[in-house]
Amino acid sequence: MRRPDGVLLFLILMGMMSFGQISPSNQTVSSSIEKLVKRAEKGDLSAQIKLAEAYSRGIGVIRNDVEAIFWLQKASDRGDPAAQNDLGYMYAEGRGIERDQAMALKWFLRAAAENFAPAQTNAAVMFASGNGTRTDDKAAFDWYSRAAKQNYAPAVAGLARLYLHGSGVAEDDAMAFKLNLKAAEKGFVTAQENLAWMFSNGRGTSRNLTEALKWNQKAAANGSPVAENNLGFLYEHGGDGLMPNLGEAVRWYRKAVTDGLAAAEYNLAVLFKEGRGVPLDPVESERLYAAAEAHGFRSSAIQQESVQAASVKGRP
């Protein structure tokens, strides 16, 4: 398995919508929305926040990102850090407004200054990746650390990545392992994937494929296609007391393929080409090879990708 690289861009891509809930209805303006509009127009901050969520997610209304931006802006101007963070997300994604990474960072930082952990984490992501600003690993470390002090699992995992790579701080595999374990035990799927990778590679701890299997299983149970692929790899190859099981390998590769992971398409293609765990099928093998490449696997990189148990994009 190769060392994971990249940054935690998934935090921005996921968004950090943290508003209250509105009872859903059909995709028409509901009476609850009408009441919210009246309250929001009178300056009710809670109503403005809930309207932004409703329009962003299509809850009780047809989704409308422009309207979501309108109400997020109003709530943000009044100093609500959750709204400011989500406004930053909208700028980062270009939803309802022209994509503007610098403006996204501005709003993340404004919310981060209020000690809002998701915004602190998003600001760290921006500094680590150089989006909206120059790359600044020390600033990333600072913001991750502030959010991690609040036991915010994504920030703890982000801090682990910096220790693993020696970015903005001295490289420390043991600390990276400790932090990933902390975040993984909180159920944060990315940390579970990263912890499995560390066990598989003996980074910050002794190599232990049984533990790698356990944490990949936890991540897979949380819906991670990366972990599904990793389970396929571990069951295919075994080692260190872990017995190979091609039936389980095929099952997990198929699940990861269904969930859209190109690495799993390649790994399953190899099995069809060699007739291991599945009937020998050159046609299906070629179809999967082609699909893997179409989904981002360059021919020159395919072999490298196929021999890793942790095809982790943007992690740790």
Image (cartoon, helix red, strand yellow):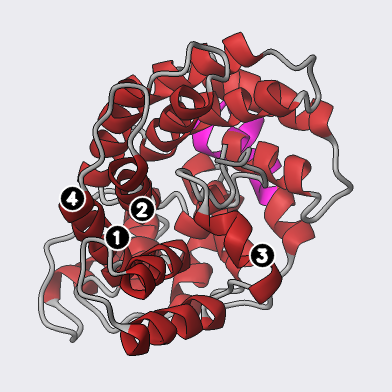
Spatial CA span between label 4 and label 3: 26 Å
Residue at 73 percent of width and 22 percent of height:
142
Q: Position of residue 215 (x, y in %)?
A: 31, 30
Q: Are marks 4 and 1 in contact (CB under 8 Å)?
A: no
Disc 1 secondary structure class: helix
Q: Earlier in the sequence, mark 4 or mark 2?
A: 2
**Hey, what amino acid is under mark 1?**
Tyr
Residue at 27 percent of width and 71 percent of height:
258
Residue identifier under label 2: 229
Which contiguous range is marked in magenta? 107-120
Instruction: Specify the principal SS of the magenta part.
Output: helix
Residue identifier under label 3: 301
Which mark's residue is nearer the viewer, 2 or 3?
Answer: 3
Spatial CA span between label 2 and label 3: 17 Å
| Label 2, residues with CA under 10 Å away: few <14, some 14-19, many ≥20 | many
**Res 74 visible:** no
Q: Position of residue 207 (x, y in %)?
A: 46, 18
* Residue 248 marker: 4
Residue identifier under label 1: 253
Q: Position of residue 259 (x, y in %)?
A: 30, 66
Q: Earlier in the sequence, mark 1 or mark 2?
A: 2
Using the rendered view, name the quadrant where residue 151 is placed: top left
Disc 4 secondary structure class: helix
